[in-house]
Image (cartoon, rainbow, N blue to C red):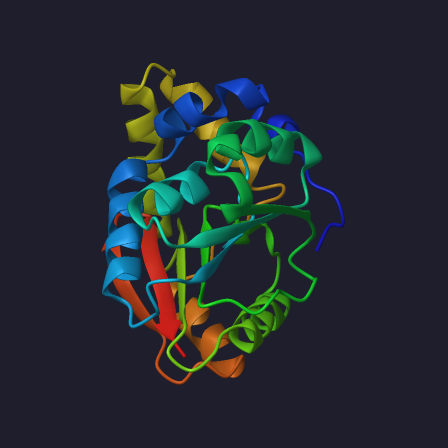
Amino acid sequence: MKSEHSVSAHLHLNTAEYDQTIRRLIPYYDESRGVQLDLLAAANIPEISRVVDLGGGTGSLAEAILDRFPATSVVVRDIDRHMLEAASARLSRFGNRVELEVGSFADSLPPSNAVLAAFALHHVPTLKEKAEVYRRIREALPPGGVFLNTDAVSGPFWPWLRDRWAEFMAQQGFSLDQAYQNLTDWAAEDTYFSVSEELCAMEQAGFERPECFWRRGPIAVLGACQ
C-alpha cells in the first residue's frame, strides 16, 4: 500500500470540486450512502459511540454521521492532507465531536464502536493486504461493534458492469470515450475484488459472519458485526 495518496491527482479534479464531481463518477453514490447510514442506525451500538471514518476524504460521510447521530463522535482518518484540510473546514461546526488524523490503511485504528469506509479501500492492491486492513478494523471493534464498507466490486460479470459504469458517466456529461478512459486511468491505483473475495478476506481477518448487505451494479455495501 502506498504511504501517500492524492485524490485530486488520482481523479484529476480539485479538492473543492470533489463532492459534486464524485456523484458524476460513481453510480448510486447517494443511495449507497443512505444504506450505509441506515445499517449503522440498525447496528447494536451504544447511543454515545465513537466511529472511525476510514479514508474519510473531505468529511462527507463523517458529516452525514454526525448530523444523523447527535451523540456520536467521529475520527476521520486519511493519508491525503489536502482532503483533511477540506474535512476540517467542513466539520468545524461539530467542535470536539470530530478528530482528524493523518494515517494510512496500514496503521492501527483507535478503539471504536463502528468503522465505516466509503469508496476508499479499493486503493488496497492485494487481498493479502486487504485482510490485514480488515484485521486491524476488527481489532478496533468491541463485541457488538460494526464494520460497514461501501465500495466498487467486480466479479464474473465485470466487463458488463464496467460498460454500465461507463454508460452512467456518459449520462452525467462525459463522452463515452472519456468515461472508459476514466476507468482505465483509475485502474492504475484501484483494485476491485469480487464480493466473495472481499468476504473471504474479512473471514481471514477474523470476522465470523461477513455479509454483502446491499448491491446495485458495481457498487456494494459489505461488512460485519463483531
- In percent of width and height, residue 171 lies at 27, 21
- Estimate the x, y position of residue 165 in percent, counting from the top left: 33, 36
Q: Quadrant of residue 133?
A: bottom right
Tell me residue 42's x, y (percent): 23, 64
Which residue is nearer to you in this view: 198 or 21? 21
Question: Which quadrant holds the N terminus?
Answer: bottom right
| Foreground residue among 123 and 177 | 123
Q: Front-most of 57 and 222? A: 57
Is 207 rendered above or below residue 89? below
Query: Do we see residue 35 in this rendering?
Result: yes
Query: Which residue occupies 47% across, 53% down?
Result: 73
Q: Is residue 178 left or right of residue 212?
A: right
Residue found at the far right of this picture:
3
Q: In the picture shown, does residue 81 fall above or below 97?
A: above
**Residue 79 position within the rendered picture, expressed as x and y whole percent measured from the top left:** 68, 44
Kindly tell me whether residue 156 is visible in this rendering: no
User: Up-down: is 173 above or below 186?
Assistant: above
Q: Split into 4 quadrants, where in the image is the C terminus?
A: bottom left
Q: How many marks?
A: 0
Query: In the image, what residue occupies the spot 58% across and 33% down?
Result: 88
* Residue at position x 44%, y 29% in the image: 180
